[in-house]
Image: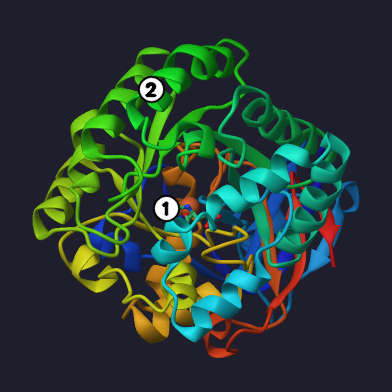
Amino acid sequence: MKGNLIIKNASELVTCSGFKAKQGKEMSELNIIYDGAVVIEDGIIKEVGKTEDILSKIEESEYKVIDATDKAVLPGFVDSHTHFVFGGYRAEEFSWRLRGDSYMEIMKRGGGIVNTVEATRKATKNELLREGKKRLDSMLSFGVTTVEGKSGYGLDFETEIKQLEVMNELDKIHHVDIVKTFLGAHAIPKEYKGKEDEFIDYMINEVMPEVAENELAEFCDIFCEKNVFSIEQSRRLLSEAKKLGLKLKIHADEIVQLGGAELACELGAISADHLLRVSDNGVKKMAETGVVATLLPGTAFSLKESYARARYMIDNNCAVALATDLNPGSCFTESIPLIFALATLYMEMTPEEAVTAFTINGAAAIDRADEIGSIDVSKKGDLVILEYPSYKYIPYHIGVNTVEKVVKNGRLVYE
Ligand code: NIG
Ligand code: FE
């Protein structure tokens, strides 16, 4: 069901206009229409302009009308990096980390990702569906209209497929659109300890073909990190994924500088994510090749690591996206306002750059910049209406949700 809708009198219609990632200085351009209106027909944006001009050529009575007087209207947010389908929780580990244990220490002694793997293997599809739906409801309330979700808590054939199928079903029943990523190489499961290369072979030969053949995922990702998967192992897995037609993402240079960003550029990945320790050369190459730098400040905050160098990346012409990284370990939050606060207060991003990073650049990070991420004619009618007159209130009202209404495919789905 797709809607016919007019939103009129928006104090700011923050269009973020564009059909590809914005790099460097372009990230400051929000292309705002003051006293703006947008017309959506059958779920697709048909007209964008000044309210006066739009209303002079449209018969209002044929549409549902939302009056956005004193409110800012933005494109729906795109959360382009999450792990939102998982079983169990790891609250205990959070307390250990507060006491001083590091994320990698906990992982080495058998906690961390493999802990969630155990719970996800045990969980039924219905349990995963129920929990996943709750998380999507919460994301929608923060203005998220498209989310990327990764597998990676199965690390075996059955559970990896189960996670992807759960996302498929959620995509059908929920307003939020889901883009799926196969992250079979997220950690080394207990049964492959010390046999990392064999595990990569298993993923390439047994699991990935099933994923690609049944179109269970659009992207392939890997946790390229010291003591997890090496550059060589990552290159091998991602190259095979590419041959099968999957697009690429990579968890790169998060804790140790391994050169994951450079690998992403070499392989033509759509995005490289985390990047807390990326090299200057990695930044230069991402700017040259247009690989989107997806930054996840919630994770740095939660792990008490230093933040990614967003300012340096933007000043050096990268396209930066922001995402939550929602997961049960390193960053258990789906809060968009938290990420806005961290990006602007701790990463020296301007409010304009943060908005771009959560809209058109988030869309580009999942290869959807032609469809979503801006208020442009021909794109999906996915919009957020704030309770305030300007986008500037998003980081200013620290950590509080400023979203009043969410429109998905031209229908009001949250208020
Ligand atoms: O993006 N870095 C690896 N993967 C996740 C963490 C997953 C977990 O701890 O469960 C991340 O931070
Ligand atoms: Fe992640």
Among the 4 quarters of the image, the one containing residue 44: top right
Crowding near the residue tagged with mark 2, few <14, some 14–19, many ≥20 C-alpha atoms within 10 Å: few
Q: Amino acid at mark 2?
A: Glu
Q: Residue 179 lies in what quarter of the image? A: top right
> Which residue occupies 62% across, 30% down?
160
- Identify whether 355 is placed above or below 345: above
Q: Quadrant of residue 23?
A: bottom left
Q: Earlier in the sequence, mark 2 or mark 1?
A: 2
Residue nearest the observer in this picture, 414 or 69: 414
52 and 74: which is toward the camera: 74
Please rate how many residues cluster around mark 1, counting C-alpha atoms within 10 Å: few if below 14, some from 14 to 19, many from 20.
Answer: many
Quadrant of the rendering where the N terminus is positioned: top right
Q: Quadrant of the C terminus?
A: bottom right
Give the percent coordinates (x, y) of residue 398: 57, 88
Instruction: Give the spatial CA distance, label 2 vs label 1.
Output: 36 Å
Element type at mark 1: helix
Residue most toward the left?
A: 281
**Tag 1: residue type?**
Asn
Q: Secondary structure at mark 2?
A: helix
Residue at image coords 15%, 51%? 282
Asked if marks 2 and 1 touch (Cβ < 8 Å), the reply is no
Residue 37 percent across, percent down from the top left: 66, 61
- Tag of residue 370: none
Whether residue 10 is visible: yes
**Residue 198: which disc?**
2
The residue at 55%/66% (across/down) is 331
Q: Is residue 268 visible?
A: no
Q: Position of residue 96 (x, y in %)?
A: 54, 77
Per the image, the residue denoted by label 1 is: 361
